[in-house]
Amino acid sequence: MFSIRRRWLSLLAAGAITASGTVALAPGSAMALTCNQPTAAWMATPDGTLANGDTVPEPPSGMRVWPVGITVPGDRITFTVVPVIGPTPGFIDPHTGATSWTYTTVQANGNCVVNQPSDSDAPILLVNAAYITATITDWRTGQVWTIVVGHVVQG
């Protein structure tokens, strides 16, 4: 009987404290419960995954890429082409023809995953040689990073 009453009182107290707003979880610990995996950004390509600074060959006609990653729920990841050998179209943007175009993903879902775009929405990458970077928020610390995803060379 005592243990049941004690448990009920502790649950009541915990609810009152939480409802009053006097107890708050640190952002890192709250997010850690949902993400449970490292913050990361990468691109799936027809010739393999572009991640961790790797190099992936690209056909002369370009290739479709699927930018994805792990970040704060509701956040997006911005991928950028940084040309090494020019001229290079980069991500092909049919509206502007930009040579260094950024691609911003959809929002990360509740478990921090940025899902890949559908095949029809995935951008085409056409470069002579370029680094791909990603600007991403670390879900553990809230810090914004720009990282090198990898290097793409025409091959």
Image: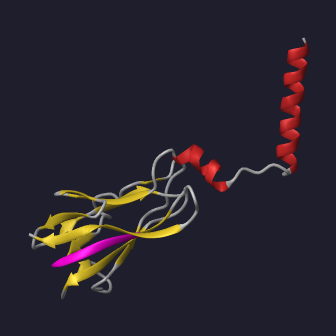
Q: Quadrant of residue 52?
A: bottom left
The picture places residue 111, in percent across and down from the top left corner, at 51, 47
* Residue 68, quarter of the rendered image: bottom left
Above/below status of 60 relative to 84: above
Residue 59 is situated, as x and y percent measured from the top left of the image, at 11, 68
Indicate yes or no whether the magenta region holds residue 101.
Answer: no
Instruction: Report the quarter where the N terminus lies.
Output: top right
1 with respect to 65 (left or right): right
Residue at position x 15%, y 79% in the image = 128
Q: Is residue 67 above or below residue 109?
A: below
| Residue at the image position 60 percent from the left and 50 percent from the top | 31
Q: Is residue 127 visible?
A: no
In the picture provided, is 93 more to the left or to the right than 1?
left
For the image shown, how many numbered marks are present on the structure? 0
Regarding residue 6, the answer to whether it shows in the image is: yes
Residue for point 59% across, 43% down? 33
* Residue 131 belongs to the span the image colors magenta: yes
**Residue at image coords 20%, 64%:** 55
Instruction: Give the percent coordinates (x, y) of residue 6.
Output: 89, 22
Q: Which residues are magenta?
A: 128-134
Label the magenta part by its dominant secondary structure.
Answer: strand
Give the colouring mode of the picture: secondary structure
Query: Left or right: 45 with respect to 108?
Result: left
For the C terminus, the image quarter is bottom left
Picture quadrant where residue 139 is located:
bottom right
